[in-house]
Image (cartoon, grey):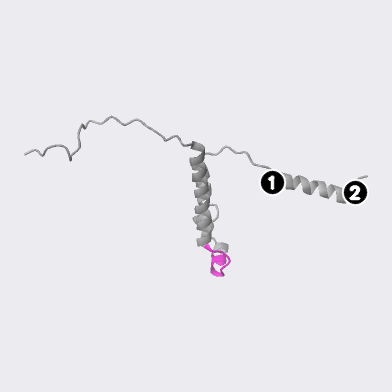
Amino acid sequence: MIDFKTISCVALAAVAASCFAPKVQAETVAEAMNKAIFNESGDIYRNAGIDRQATLLFGLSYPDKEYLGDAQSIGRIYNDALRQRGSEPVRTTDLPNPFTESLLTSPPKN
């Protein structure tokens, strides 16, 4: 017969494994940036609540550190996107242009 201690250990191990399992999620760079912008600092709806105001009033939360954490997340996402793109520069074709010379090189018209 299995005792309660063994069952609880197995259940705890299953929960821990699911928490630390890698989450495979296809996400665009834009979606990742949008999540990172408000990850720690929150949006206006979260920051306007009475609980948020109380944490700011009593010094339990520091908005400048939250913004710094968001900025670091954005930097990591940006650098990762550049790394994944590779060293090949992005080249695009020029748009059709009706002008053949610049204003600096054209003679003045009298």
Tag 1 secondary structure: helix
> Horizontal placement of 95 versus 77: left or right?
left
Q: Which residue is mark 1?
A: 20
The spot of residue 73 in percent (x, y) is 53, 50
Is residue 12 or residue 72 the one in the foreground? 72
> Horizontal placement of 65 versus 24: left or right?
left
From the image, state whether disc 1 or disc 2 is nearer to you: 1
Q: Residue 96's quadrant in the figure? A: top left
**Label 2 crowding class (10 Å Cα cut-off): few <14, some 14-19, many 20+?**
few
Q: Earlier in the sequence, mark 1 or mark 2?
A: 2
Q: Residue drawn 49% across and 45% down?
A: 78
Residue 39 lies, with reference to residue 48, above or below; the image says: above
Q: In the displayed image of the protein, which residue is found farthest to the right?
A: 1
Amino acid type, callout 2: Asp
Residue 18 lies, with reference to residue 49, above or below; the image says: above
> Horizontal placement of 89 versus 76: left or right?
left
The spot of residue 6 in percent (x, y) is 86, 48
The residue range painted magenta reads: 53-62
Q: Residue drawn 50% across and 45% down?
A: 79
The spot of residue 92 in percent (x, y) is 37, 32
Residue 11 lies, with reference to residue 58, above or below; the image says: above
Q: Which residue is mark 2?
A: 3
Is residue 92 covered in magenta? no
Q: Residue drawn 53% across and 60% down?
A: 65
- Is residue 15 visible in this depiction of the protein? yes
Is residue 53 or residue 77 the one in the foreground? 77
Tag 2 secondary structure: loop
Q: Residue 109's quadrant in the figure? A: top left
Is residue 56 covered in magenta? yes
The spot of residue 102 in percent (x, y) is 20, 37
